[in-house]
Amino acid sequence: MAEDINMDSFIRDTLNSFQRVRDKSFTPIQQTIVSKTSTNIVSPPRPATLESFTGGEVLQEGGGVSGTFLVSHRLGEDGTVVGIDVTAGSYHILNTNTDVPAKSGDGKYVYAVIEHSTAGVFKEFKIEISQTSKDPVNLDAQDEYIQFSNILLAEGMVVGGKPVMVQRRVGNLSLVHQIVNGKLCLWAYSSGGTSL
């Protein structure tokens, strides 16, 4: 017991001898406070209908009209639909922006199709014009991963007896990872469009 008391005393004395003497002339450095302000810029409202460059009509709602991936009917002299035109745009993935040229074709639906080489790994991007609708995703031959993400950009409809293209997505596309039906894939998001 006496040895424990002596040991405690020895430890206290040793620790006390190592205490630093505080410098009394020390003054803390003053930090400059920086204030930040933000300004909201409000853009004027956009019209709900955009005239297309081919004489048809494009119904557009939502934010961020940038003129990219806009879809319109190409009309013949008699006013019948003879094709579809899609303006150029771009897609963004992993800090890389890639331009996509304008496209023309025949069909009722326009899709941004993302092909994967394996689960969530980007392989190719293309714009596809189709006569029939597509499922949002298609699995590979072994049903192991999502091979194609099919994002509807626009679809043809008849409104008031006139053919129109309803723009589901407008603006350049950002490709992000998403879980669809329990499987990882890339999906395209844009700044605007009319919801289904």
Image (cartoon, helix red, strand yellow):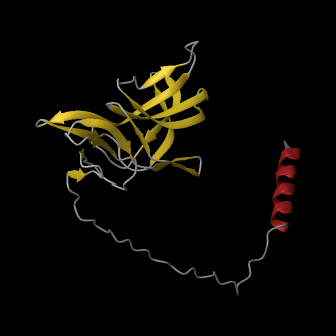
Q: Please, is residue 161 above or below residue 59 in the view?
A: above
- Toward the top, the furthest residue is 142
Q: Which residue is drawn at 63% across and 81% down?
A: 29
When asked about the image quadrant of residue 78, the answer is top left
Q: Nearer the viewer, residue 74 or 72?
A: 74
- Is residue 196 at least partly visible in the picture? no
- Is residue 33 at least partly visible in the picture? yes
Percent of width and height locating residue 170:
35, 47
Q: Nearer the viewer, residue 27 or 125?
A: 125
- Toward the left, the furthest residue is 160
When asked about the image quadrant of residue 28, the answer is bottom right
Q: Nearer the viewer, residue 85 or 43?
A: 85
Q: Which of 153 and 84 is in front in this view?
A: 84
Left or right placement of residue 15 versus residue 35 in this view: right
Left or right placement of residue 183 versus residue 192 in this view: right
Q: Residue at x 45, y 24 (%)?
A: 137
Percent of width and height locating residue 173:
45, 46
Percent of width and height locating residue 180:
45, 26
Give the number of marks.
0
The quadrant of the image that shows the N terminus is: top right
- Toward the bottom, the furthest residue is 25
The quadrant of the image that shows the C terminus is: top left
Percent of width and height locating residue 97:
55, 51
- Toward the front, the furthest residue is 77
Left or right placement of residue 185 versus residue 172 in this view: right
Q: Residue at x 58, y 29 (%)?
A: 116
